[in-house]
Image: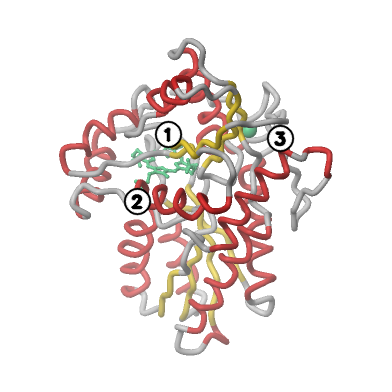
Amino acid sequence: MAYDAFLLLSFGGPEGQDDVLPFLENVTRGRGIPRERLETVAGHYRHFGGVSPINAQCRALIEALRPRLDLPIYWGNRNWHPMLADTVAKMRDDGVQRALAFVTSPFGSYSSCRQYLDDIAVARAAVPGAPVIDKIRHYHDHPGYIAPHADAVRAALAALPSRMAARIVFTAHSIPTSMNAASGPGGAGRYEAQLRETAALVAAEAAPELPWDLAWQSRSGPPQVPWLEPDINDHLETLAKDGVREVVVSPIGFISDHLEVIWDLDEEARATAARLGMAFARAATPGVDPRFADMVRALVEERVLAHSNVRHALGTVPTWDFCPDDCCASPKRA
Ligand SMILES: CC1=C(CCC(=O)O)c2cc3nc(cc4[nH]c(cc5[nH]c(cc1n2)c(C)c5CCC(=O)O)c(CCC(=O)O)c4C)C(CCC(=O)O)=C3C
Ligand SMILES: [Fe+2]
């Protein structure tokens, strides 16, 4: 397949205090998020001057990709500028015919996969003559994703007083259990399955001798809707009761230090651990690790040279190039 452009497709985040509320309105429109939750999350952004780290991370990734890709690079977001529809219009004006999109989430689910496909469809519908845009597959078990996380877990373990007694707790963004059930072709619960595989692969590479768990963070939505559990803070309580004194928390659900990482883990989970008297080290995310940037290049090559059969994967949970219609369906909303 021939492509004449590369598109970085991400979530977007505010870049100043005045952006916070309009950004949150974009994120939560029609999603039934309680008002109090919105105010709480606005406070997290305000704590950092109203600036999400995510846009700077996208810019840094683009700079890391420039020397690695022979394609012009474009960037568009779901929820904040540069908005995807504006980017698609620019691509059309530049004569782009067929672009390949890399999404900043490695996993399948409505929020992390299908919603980006919907974003592409909506943006293209708004731009007459828009290029075709194909999405790159999930990369939850790609060596370029696993290796930086594994190194980071090793480094975090080294920062603990006595790594012998440590527990590794991997985290990812919680989603409603109904959204998890609908993840993957035919609704196969792939979100959790992929994350468990990522966790197992990172643990095996970083510290095969240590026990690990998968916990969830950043729960949203109304309280009566079930989301994936345990929450990281509840899980730390359980571990403390079981006598665990040291934890490494590794956010394998994130490619870079999103606001959920620097608030929900570095502030909240760290405070929970301190209250419980546990030593706490947060493992880094890939960010612009050269192996992660090389992975993006490899994923582009994999699609361009589809006949070459090179498809790096360390696990067995399948990934697929084109999501079928019944993949990662939108969950019913309350
Ligand atoms: C699976 C998943 C990912 C990973 C995949 C991916 O990366 O796309 C993700 C990423 C992100 N989520 C982000 C921010 C927010 N997510 C929210 C709300 C929600 N997230 C959900 C799921 C996910 N979210 C869901 C099911 C909701 C409920 C509303 C709904 O059904 O859609 C809300 C509303 C307030 C709240 O309730 O928290 C905010 C502000 C940011 C930006 C961070 C930054 O600024 O650095 C990023 C990268
Ligand atoms: Fe999907």
Instruction: Give amino acid for label 3.
Output: Asp
Mark 2 lies on a secondary structure that is helix
From the image, tell me which residue sits under label 3.
Answer: 321
Position of residue 265 relative to residue 161, above or below, is above
Side (left or right) of 42 relative to 261: left
From the image, tell me which residue sits under label 1.
Answer: 76
Instruction: Give amino acid for label 1.
Output: Gly
Q: Earlier in the sequence, mark 1 or mark 3?
A: 1
Rounded to the nearest angstrom, the CA distance separating label 1 from label 2 is 13 Å
Q: Earlier in the sequence, mark 2 or mark 3?
A: 2
Residue 179: percent from left, percent from top? 55, 34
Category of crowding for the residue at label 1, using alpha-carbon neighbours closer than 10 angstroms: few (below 14), some (14–19), many (at least 20): many
* Ligand 2 image-quadrant field: top right
Position of residue 19 relative to residue 168, above or below, is above
| Labels 1, 3: front one | 1
Residue 110: percent from left, percent from top? 55, 32
Label 1 within 8 A of ligand 1 by Cβ: no
Quadrant of the rendered structure where residue 331 is?
Answer: top right
Category of crowding for the residue at label 3, using alpha-carbon neighbours closer than 10 angstroms: few (below 14), some (14–19), many (at least 20): few
Residue 143: percent from left, percent from top? 68, 60
Instruction: Give amino acid for label 2.
Output: Ala
Mark 3 lies on a secondary structure that is loop
Quadrant of the rendered structure where residue 277 is?
Answer: bottom left
Q: Earlier in the sequence, mark 1 or mark 2?
A: 2
From the image, tell me which residue sits under label 2.
Answer: 56
Q: In the rendered structure, are the residues bearing label 1 and label 2 in contact, judged by CB atoms less than 8 Å apart?
A: no
